[in-house]
Amino acid sequence: MVPLSWYMGLSAAVFSIGIFGFLTRRNIIIMFMSIELMLNAVNINLVAMSHYLQDIRGQVMVMFIIAVAAAEAAIGLAIIIAIFRNRATVHVDEINEMKG
């Protein structure tokens, strides 16, 4: 049996990689992938705690998070495609249309 601390360590490592990718990269597609990594780290954490505590609520919450992540990815990619068609770039530094 794998101890809970290994799952927590894996979750922390994946979340850290997601934060690092989001903060250091300027490509908006990589930033969205980093956000997905962070959501998956939370999912790993919730499933591990749910299994450890013998409670199903964490796993049910994971299903909601997966649904929200799928909707976020679909809407985010649609926005990225629209911006790319108008500006011909996916770099965050060059996109300033929404600045007020």
Image (cartoon, rainbow, N blue to C red):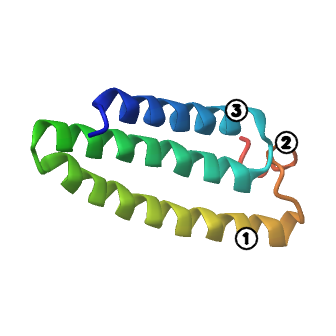
What residue is pinned by disc 3?
Answer: 23
Mark 2 vs mark 3: give the one in front: 3
Instruction: Please indicate whether residue 80 sits to the left or right of residue 53 in the image.
Output: right
Task: Please state which amino acid type lies under the numbered disc 3.
Answer: Leu
Mark 1–mark 2 Cα distance, whole angstroms, equals 17 Å
Residue 8: quadrant of the picture: top left
Name the residue located 38 percent from the left edge and 60 percent from the top edge. 66
Mark 3 vs mark 1: give the one in front: 3
Does 90 appear above or below 40? below
- Residue 43 percent location from the top left of the image: 36, 47
Task: Please state which amino acid type lies under the numbered disc 2.
Answer: Asp
Dot 1 and dot 2 residues touching (CB under 8 Å): no
Secondary structure beneath disc 2?
A: helix
Name the residue located 37 percent from the left edge and 36 percent from the top edge. 7
What residue is pinned by disc 1?
Answer: 82
Does 17 appear above or below 33? above
Counting other residues with Cα less than 10 Å from the Cα at mark 3, is it few (<14), some (14-19), or many (20 or more)?
few
- Residue 69 percent location from the top left of the image: 44, 58
What residue is pinned by disc 2?
Answer: 93
Front-most of residues 14 and 66:
14
